Image (cartoon, grey):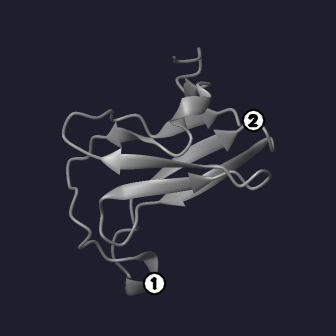
């Protein structure tokens, strides 16, 4: 479900602990980090309604997924990088 401002809303509790696919043009983890003077690591922005906070969620070191964890309740969502996924970079979740 998408909101009028383009943020994808995920309200289904079954999403926690599972994941959704993220489509990326370069799924390789071989990008330099900000401290290396290169390109920053790809990231997602996730808004947790439970805590009323946005999180910056970087891609894992293997380049295979993003893990967002609610700062209030600790529930997590894995966003798996895959060819059949979405190019959406902003998500809104309910715990």
Taking the image as shown, residue 9 lies to the left or right of residue 60, namely right
- Snapshot quadrant of residue 59: bottom left
Taking the image as shown, residue 16 lies to the left or right of residue 87, namely right
Q: Secondary structure at mark 2?
A: loop
Q: Is residue 89 above or below residue 70?
A: above
Q: Which residue corresponds to mark 1?
A: 35
Residue depicted at x 55% and y 31%: 14
Residue depicted at x 59% and y 21%: 5
Q: Quadrant of the C terminus?
A: top right
Q: Is residue 42 above or below residue 77?
A: below
Out of 10 and 16, give the one closest to the viewer. Answer: 16
| Label 2 Cα neighbours within 10 Å, binned few <14 / some 14-19 / many ≥20 | some
**Tag 1 or tag 2, which sits nearer the N-term?**
1
| Label 1 Cα neighbours within 10 Å, binned few <14 / some 14-19 / many ≥20 | few
Q: Which residue corresponds to mark 2?
A: 49
Tell which residue pokes out farthest to the bottom in this image. 36
């Amino acid at each position: 479900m998408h909101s009028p401002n383009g943020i994808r809303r995920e309200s289904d509790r079954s999403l926690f602990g599972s994941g959704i696919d993220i489509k990326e043009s370069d799924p390789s983890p071989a990008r330099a980090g900000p401290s290396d003077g290169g390109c920053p690591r790809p990231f997602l922005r996730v808004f947790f309604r439970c805590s009323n906070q946005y999180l910056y969620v970087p891609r894992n070191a293997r380049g295979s997924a993003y893990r967002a964890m609610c700062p209030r309740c600790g529930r997590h969502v894995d966003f798996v990088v895959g060819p059949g996924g979405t190019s959406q970079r902003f998500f809104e979740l309910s715990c």
